[in-house]
Image (cartoon, grey):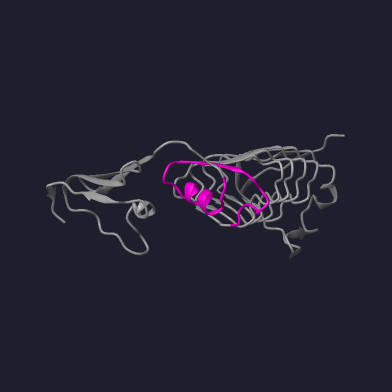
Amino acid sequence: EPCLLTSGGEGDMWDFWGYKGDGFISSNTEPWNAYRSVITGLSLPEGLTSIGDVAFNGCWRLSSVVIPGNVTRIGEYAFGACDALREVVIPEGVIDVGESAFNFCTSLTEAVLPESVEYVGSWAFAFCFDLSSITFLNPTCIISDDCLDCTQNVTVCGYTGSTAELFAAEQNLPFVPLGDFTAEGVCGDNLTWSFASATGLLTIEGSGEMWDYTYWMPAPWYNYTSLLTAVSFPAGLTG
């Protein structure tokens, strides 16, 4: 019979760890551990901000997951070995997809990582044997070299000049470009910046002094420096 696991409240979920080794994880610390084999659905609260490590690992009958919009982190092994998981909706706002978060989700066919995702950990989608495509909407997302395993022939989708394109080339995987991208923002009281991946040009416009940046607080175009080929400064720039 279908079994829906419902959780309530708000904030970060605890991490649940047991034995970790050889790509597998076992844990008996989740409060719902005794029911993992019968859980077919999840109802997670909108106030949830983090999905804990190993939280739903081994819920092998779980078929679909909608992650709430306030979640910023999907923990390590959070949905590992969910064999029946065919669909997962990762919302804008998630920043970190942890190591092995979806590994051995053998029925998962597609993964779309929104623009907010900054990091995808090792083995995050490894051994997902039905996975046919993975899309990275953040052109500067840090993608672990081994987020997939070497046996997968997955089509990678992303923007031209993005880290997704570089990842596909390094892993000898087919790449489908989503086109060029642009980014823009503010860099002074009367200064704006924009970057176009098609040309590699960073354009500063306006007048006055540029804000100061440091190692700990880098310039807003820092993530695009590997793609940057030229900079255009305005005549009104004073510092």
Quadrant hosting residue 83: top right
Q: In x, y percent, where is residue 180?
A: 39, 38
Residue 95 falls inside the magenta stretch: no
29 w.r.t. 94: above or below: below
Please name whichever residue, 198 or 118, is drawn nearer the observer in this view of the structure.
Answer: 198
In the figure, residue 20 lies in which quadrant?
bottom right
Q: Residue 59 vs residue 44: left or right?
A: right
Quarter of the image with the C terminus is: bottom left
Residue sitting at the far top: 1
Who's the residue at 72% across and 61% down the image?
A: 17
171 and 180: which is toward the camera:
171
Q: Position of residue 183 (x, y in %)?
A: 35, 42
Name the residue: 67% across, 38% down. Answer: 109
- Residue 64 vertical placement versus 165 (above, below): above
Q: Quadrant of residue 4?
A: top right
Q: Residue 45's spot in the image, x, y percent?
A: 65, 40
Rendered position, 157 above or below 78: above
Q: What residue sits 12% from the left and 47% below the top?
A: 236
Residue 223, position in %: x, y?
A: 39, 53
Q: Give the range drawn in magenta.
A: 146-173
Front one among 62 and 232: 232
Q: Which residue lies furthest to the front in this view?
A: 172
